[in-house]
Amino acid sequence: MHLLIIEDDLDLGHALQQSLKAEGITSSWLRRCADVPFSLNEEPIDGVLLDVALPDGSGMALLQRWRREGCHVPVIMITARSALQDRLDGLDGGADDFVIKPFAMPELLSRIRAVMRRTAQQASEVWSLGRLEIEPRRRVARLGGRPLDLSQREFDLLLELAREAGSVVPKALIAQRLAPLGDPLDYRFDRQADVQAILLAMQWHANALRHQQGLDGDLMVALQSVLGNLIDNAIKYGRDGGRIVVTLIAQAGELVLTVSDDGPGIPPERREQVFDRFVRGGQDDIKGTGLGLAIVQQGTRRLRGGVRLVAGIDGQGVGFEVRWPAQGSM
């Protein structure tokens, strides 16, 4: 589940993000009306926590605009106003629930679960979809009464599909909900999953950058070339059952992309020439042209950035860090 927080208070915003993360809920946080997308219909979010009073406008005005354009994303209003009429106006205006400051975080989390349960058309904490049963709070799933042995990411994926039962959910939308900008995408892969891993990462990062940085077409092509070659390199020289971690963050006017693996790494004697053409960084028995990392370096130059070797995962393998100026800094 991915929520959008619109709250100007720094302490409360940080507390909300930390509490949501502890519950396995990802979030994005905005502090002003001007930063909020005009429409939420194309945004990969499952719900909104919306402060009524914002520095540059009214949360109620945002809610009314969304409802006028037919947006059905669940919205929980956060307010310091205790007057009954304020709550009635909000609920009649399209809010799904209200919480009054100061509030207990467990109560807010319970209200979030209740709203999301209603959105998914489920009557209780145990979601039923045919023979499948899911308990989101306990993170338990059963098929025909038998427990399913699922990893954390597999359970999160199952839950996202269950929220949209009966609908086709785009892969890029699922990826953005499960791992928004700044959170790592962590793959445990085998050779059969290679193409899917590349496509998922490229689609997620492309969507994140389009929404948050406004990259133009030429720069998106360069980024996709860099990302595709780095992940392809990690898969090619990694080990079956190994991991790839892809992270993209905005930091001090720069965008920083890191792709790391826990494979055998690059021999010390090849590290200095690894970005040269026809130089292969890994095992000689793996098929390849030796051009992938040279293409990566060329792509980073088109982004007006640079690429360097960094540590791999848990002291194993190798990582590549790409830095380039954010769009507004170029």
Image (cartoon, helix red, strand yellow):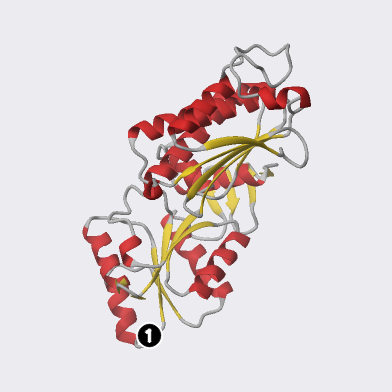
Q: Which residue extends farthest bottom?
A: 83
Q: Measured along the vertical axis of the image, is residue 40 above or below residue 232?
A: below
The residue most toward the front is 272
Q: Residue 175 in the image: x percent, y percent?
A: 50, 41
Above or below, comparing residue 288 to residue 27 in the picture? above
Q: Quick one: 126 or 316, which is closer to the camera?
A: 316
Residue 18 position, x and y percent, is 59, 65
Image spot of residue 60 (x, y percent)? 29, 72
Residue 58 shown left or right of residue 211 in the figure: left
Residue 17 drawn at (x, y percent) = 54, 64
Q: Is disc 1 placed on a helix, strand or loop?
A: loop
56 displayed left or right of 208: left
Question: Where on the picture, by quarter, is residue 158?
Answer: top right
Residue with the most extreme left position: 68
Residue 224 vs 133, above or below: the answer is: above
The residue nearer to you, when weighing 50 against 73, is 50
> In the image, 212: left or right of 236?
left
Residue bearing the label numbered 1: 81
For the C terminus, give its image quadrant. top left
Q: Quadrant of residue 143?
A: top right
The answer to whether 104 is drawn above or below residue 169 in the figure is below
The quarter of the displayed image where residue 15 is located? bottom right
Observer able to see residue 238: no
Residue shown at 53% from the left, 27% from the top: 296
Three-letter amino acid code at the position of disc 1: Arg
Residue at 50%, 83% in the rendered image: 102
**Could you tell me how many numbered marks the image carries?**
1
Q: Is residue 178 visible?
A: yes
Q: Residue at x 49, y 65 (%)?
A: 112
Callout 1: 10 Å neighbours few (<14), some, many (20+)?
some
